[in-house]
Image (tube, helix red, strand yellow):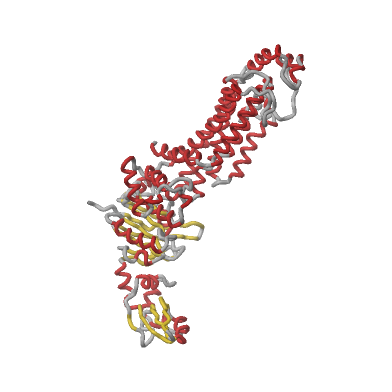
């Protein structure tokens, strides 16, 4: 157990001493700010916007991880490190948790940026790449819900998959990246995807889909939007419409009712992550005796 | 105090269908320094990786203190220090942080770890550079750090795979001076193909050739075996080229119009040749000739074997 902490501490240190990690912090801050300004510019699209943000945050972060064990091999460190009494599960878990915790922190940077911009940003003109904001803050809850429901599980699965793939294929990042791209992108275009296999949750929330638009179901909110075309003009909305729009927007985050299969979907990916982690430990154990 | 025994029992390693890196290697070793000597590709690294529990043999057993290290590798990992032939470091951390990391993995903690880290840094002459990032270290410094990490846990079994490769002459001398102090009550296995590295320190030698143990014993025994087969001879330059074509010349120093040579031959190669005391390198060369054991025995008995044609 102690060795797990030792490996994790050093791995964490190595990750945060890499300039790419700090570049990713910047990228996450920008994504978070774009999400929040988008929501306050068009609150009726908030759920889709939060879904898209979670999609990009998880996809970008997953591409940045997975090399922790393979890097030791590439840098010819396995001879020294794996001839010590460190237990293989402790070694793998230390590397894994350090990588995962770093991804959570990076995703957390996007969340924090979104919350701060949501709360404090009030410029009603285009500023740099940020949209003008015309509506009041959405508050903390929508961001936390989307972070927990959509981003966290995707990051857990992506981090585990990349670590397993990079370790078992001895550093074939191209293969791992292609698989990740397919797993993330296909559900965005294929509404016929089995619900259990959609890591992006697009099949549950068609708002996230990039595929051919199907006729949108008529909801009170849609009726309201259709009845008030003034909302879609450039510039601030009529003052009397702001409160109803905010009320209806927040009521749709998350859309209710939550599909029952959605929970199974999340559990499936957590379970799959566990299997991949066990495979990684086994693969590393075998590698340790064939260095 | 009972010394742990390392017992390597008819160990073989096959990498491909018909490519054996090591064949039926057996050795028993207690405290002391074993010099494992052989040309490149002889199987030294394969054997040492097995001792370091990083490679499983195709056949055979290895025991440490009576315990099978192939089944229970953790038993030997706790008491072992290993310097691989080729290794790297984390470039973004300092030597001190690296040593603390490896030390903690080896089970050292707190003050004891700090004291050991300082001690090994001092031992390998890296104290002044301990807080520099490893990406700024030269190859020789990284090599010394590799030796330092192996010594952290005061190992009972020290496995060094060509530790002097990449060291400059001063660093190599420093290492040679350090080795006797390391041996004490531990088993040190030190592979090299540079005989001078082990000349003064090895208590035992094992010569490997093409995956097989070709000779084992003390350095004195190796020298004694080669005692009657080393000669010195000073001959004119003009004769030297044809002479060299027929005899194994271990050194040749031009002296004006003549050449002072040292020759390895079972029988007097020239009427003016004088018997000489062999160096360990010369003795090793005799045993690494590209002939089998029986043929070599015959060579020592038969002048025709290496006489001019």
Residue drawn at the location 44% of the way across and 60% of the way down? B166
Residue A89 appearing in the image = no
Q: Where is residue A283 in the image (x, y as percent from the top left)?
A: 49, 43
Is residue A45 shown left or right of residue B105? right
Residue B169 appearing in the image = yes
Q: In this view, does B65 lie above or below A6?
A: below
Q: Position of residue A68 (x, y in %)?
A: 51, 42
Q: Residue furthest top?
A: A240
The answer to which of B92 and A210 lies nearer the viewer is B92
Residue A250: quadrant of the picture: top right
The answer to which of A43 and B279 lies nearer the viewer is A43
Is residue A183 shown left or right of residue B61? right
Is residue A93 shown left or right of residue A47? left
Q: Where is residue B147 in the image (x, y as percent from the top left)?
A: 38, 54
Residue drawn at the location 53% of the way across and 37% of the way down? A276
Residue A24: quadrant of the picture: top right
Residue drawn at the location 61% of the way across and 32% of the way down? A30
Q: Where is residue A201 in the image (x, y as percent from the top left)?
A: 63, 27
Residue A198: quadrant of the picture: top right
Q: Residue furthest left?
A: B1
Number of numbered tags placed on the structure image:
0
The answer to which of A95 and A279 lies nearer the viewer is A95
Is residue A248 shown left or right of residue B73? right
């Amino acid at each position: 157990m102690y060795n797990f902490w030792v490996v994790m501490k050093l791995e964490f240190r190595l990750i945060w001493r890499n300039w790419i990690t700090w570049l990713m912090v910047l990228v996450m801050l920008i994504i978070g700010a774009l999400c929040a300004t988008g929501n306050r510019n068009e609150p009726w699209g908030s759920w889709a916007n939060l879904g898209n943000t979670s999609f990009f945050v998880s996809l970008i972060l997953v591409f940045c991880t997975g090399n922790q064990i393979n890097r030791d091999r590439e840098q010819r460190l396995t001879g020294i490190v794996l001839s010590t009494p460190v237990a293989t599960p402790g070694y793998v878990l230390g590397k894994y948790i350090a990588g995962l915790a770093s991804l959570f922190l990076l995703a957390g940077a996007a969340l924090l940026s979104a919350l701060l911009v949501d709360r404090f940003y009030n410029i009603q003109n285009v500023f740099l790449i940020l949209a003008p904001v015309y509506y009041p803050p959405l508050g903390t809850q929508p961001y936390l819900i989307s972070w927990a429901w959509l981003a966290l599980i995707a990051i857990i699965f992506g981090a585990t998959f990349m670590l397993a793939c990079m370790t078992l294929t001895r550093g074939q990042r191209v293969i791992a990246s292609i698989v990740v791209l397919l797993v993330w992108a296909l559900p965005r275009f294929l509404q016929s995807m089995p619900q259990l296999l959609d890591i992006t949750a697009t099949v549950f929330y068609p708002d996230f889909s990039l595929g051919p638009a199907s006729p949108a179901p008529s909801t009170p909110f849609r009726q309201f939007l259709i009845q008030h075309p003034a909302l879609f003009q450039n510039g601030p909305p009529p003052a009397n419409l702001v409160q109803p729009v905010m009320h209806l927007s927040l009521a749709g985050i998350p859309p209710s009712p939550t599909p029952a299969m959605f929970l199974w979907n999340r559990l499936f990916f957590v379970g799959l992550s566990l299997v991949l982690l066990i495979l990684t430990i086994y693969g590393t154990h075998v590698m340790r005796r064939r260095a | 105090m009972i010394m742990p025994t390392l017992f390597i029992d008819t160990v073989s390693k096959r990498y491909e269908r018909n490519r054996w890196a090591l064949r039926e290697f057996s050795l028993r070793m207690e405290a002391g320094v074993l010099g494992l000597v052989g040309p490149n590709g002889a199987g030294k690294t394969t054997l040492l990786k097995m001792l370091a529990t990083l490679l499983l043999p195709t056949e055979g057993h290895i025991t440490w203190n009576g315990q099978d290290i192939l089944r229970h590798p953790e038993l030997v990992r706790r008491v072992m220090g290993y310097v691989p032939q080729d290794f790297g470091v984390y470039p973004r951390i300092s030597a001190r942080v690296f040593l603390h990391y490896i030390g903690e993995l080896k089970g050292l903690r707190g003050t004891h770890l700090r004291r050991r880290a300082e001690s090994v840094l001092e031992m390998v002459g890296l104290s002044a550079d301990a807080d520099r990032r490893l990406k700024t270290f030269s190859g020789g410094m990284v090599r010394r750090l590799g030796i330092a990490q192996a010594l952290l846990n005061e190992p009972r079994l020290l496995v060094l795979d060509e530790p002097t490769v990449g060291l400059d002459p001063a660093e190599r001398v420093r290492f040679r001076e350090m080795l006797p102090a390391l041996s004490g009550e531990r088993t040190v296995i030190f592979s090299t193909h540079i005989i001078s590295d082990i000349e003064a320190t090895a208590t035992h030698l094992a010569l490997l050739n093409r995956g097989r143990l070709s000779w084992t014993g003390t350095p004195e025994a190796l020298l004694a075996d080669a005692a009657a087969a080393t000669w010195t001879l000073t001959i004119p330059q003009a004769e030297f080229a044809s002479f060299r074509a027929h005899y194994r010349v271990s050194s040749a120093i031009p002296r004006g119009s003549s050449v002072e040579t040292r020759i390895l031959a079972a029988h007097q190669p020239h009427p003016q040749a004088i018997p000489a005391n062999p160096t360990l390198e010369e003795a090793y060369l005799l045993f690494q000739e590209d002939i089998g054991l029986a043929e070599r025995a015959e060579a020592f008995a038969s002048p025709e074997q290496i006489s001019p044609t």
